[in-house]
Amino acid sequence: MTETDLRFKLRGSISTTHYGHQKLIALFNQCREYFDTSITVCFRDLTWIDANMAALLQAIVRKLEKENNLELVADLDESTQQFRVLFGNGLFESDVSHLLNTGTSIRLKEFYTKDNDDFVKYIENDFIDFPNLSLNEASKETIIQSLIEVFTNYEIHAKADYPIFLCGQYYPTKRILKFTIVDLGIGFLKPIQAQVEVIDTYAKAIDWALVEGNTTKTDAPGGLGLCELRSSMEENNGSLEIVSGNAYKACGFKNGIKIDTCKTMNAFHIGTTINLVFYGV
């Protein structure tokens, strides 16, 4: 595609942290000021991007396409080593994309709420059965059922005609697998506050959702999705990260050390991100 007059640069590194999310949300906020045009996003000053963050980047692109009628054009070269994986996992297209898949990616996919069967197949086959992820059968079943619960909750609370975005990446040198799920729904606070008025921040809403039995469903049992997902990640030396509004919650284990933190971001997220991070795999 031809480069455009409007250009925004991504700089430094974009990792699976609150800093990385802030950089991509900043890009979204820059672009959302424009309508009915093309914008070039320059990657040439970017030293690194976690490939699983392609899920958030794709969500941003889809939202800007639909709501602002924008076309985002990437200025990068598939021969640049740190970006090759973004062609291999399906974020960008190239004549040689099929040659750039190193076997470390869990491909980028989008699923609408009507695509429940395809979503489950993807979770089971692409994520849970990923070669480097060794889980016992109980953990596999718990994670699958928890993610189905997450998907079901998105269907109930989305309030937007967007798919859910998923992508993963294995980092063999660090022996870390990161799996990212992004939706463009209304986030945690509004549906929870509608039931529990004292919940007045996104951080409190996330903490409430992590408690066993807490659910916003009124016509069916629920609420175990995130609680059991957190427990399963802890059992497998991993961490669960939830990003909603201006809150970035991380809990579980990181390299064997117990963590339970909540960072306040400098901008509001455009939906919800869930990161599952497995260490020592």
Image: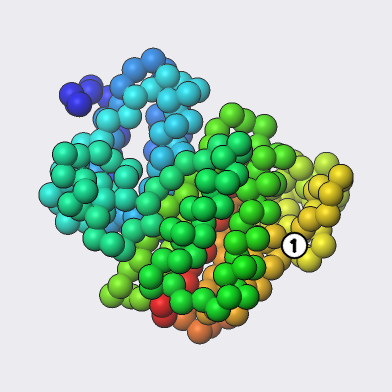
Is residue 235 among the parts visible in the rendering?
A: yes
Looking at the picture, how far across and down is residue 133, in whole percent?
A: 44, 72
- Of residues 181 and 187, the one nearer the viewer is 181
**Quadrant in which the C terminus is drawn:** bottom left
| Residue type at numbered disc 1 | Leu
Q: Taking 84 as reference, is 2 above or below it?
A: above
The part of the image, by quadrant, that contains residue 279 is bottom left
Residue found at x 67% / y 40%: 155
101 left or right of 110 in image:
left
Q: Residue furthest top?
A: 36
What residue is shown with label 1?
224
Kind of element beneath mark 1 = helix
Residue found at x 52% / y 53%: 121
Q: Residue furthest bottom?
A: 256
Q: Taking 167 as reference, is 57 above or below it?
A: above
Number of disc labels: 1
**Quadrant in which the N terminus is drawn:** top left
Looking at the picture, how far across and down is residue 34, in whole percent?
A: 41, 21
Looking at the picture, how far across and down is residue 233, in whole percent?
A: 58, 72
Looking at the picture, how far across and down is residue 15, in whole percent?
A: 38, 58
Q: Taking 268 as reference, is 142 above or below it?
A: below
Is residue 56 among the parts visible in the rendering?
A: no
Q: Residues within 10 Å of mark 1 (few under 14, many from 20)?
A: many
Residue found at x 61% / y 38%: 113
The coloring applied to the image is: rainbow
- Of residues 107 and 178, the one nearer the viewer is 107
Q: Residue furthest left?
A: 79
Residue found at x 32% / y 45%: 90
Q: Taking 33 as reference, is 231 above or below it?
A: below
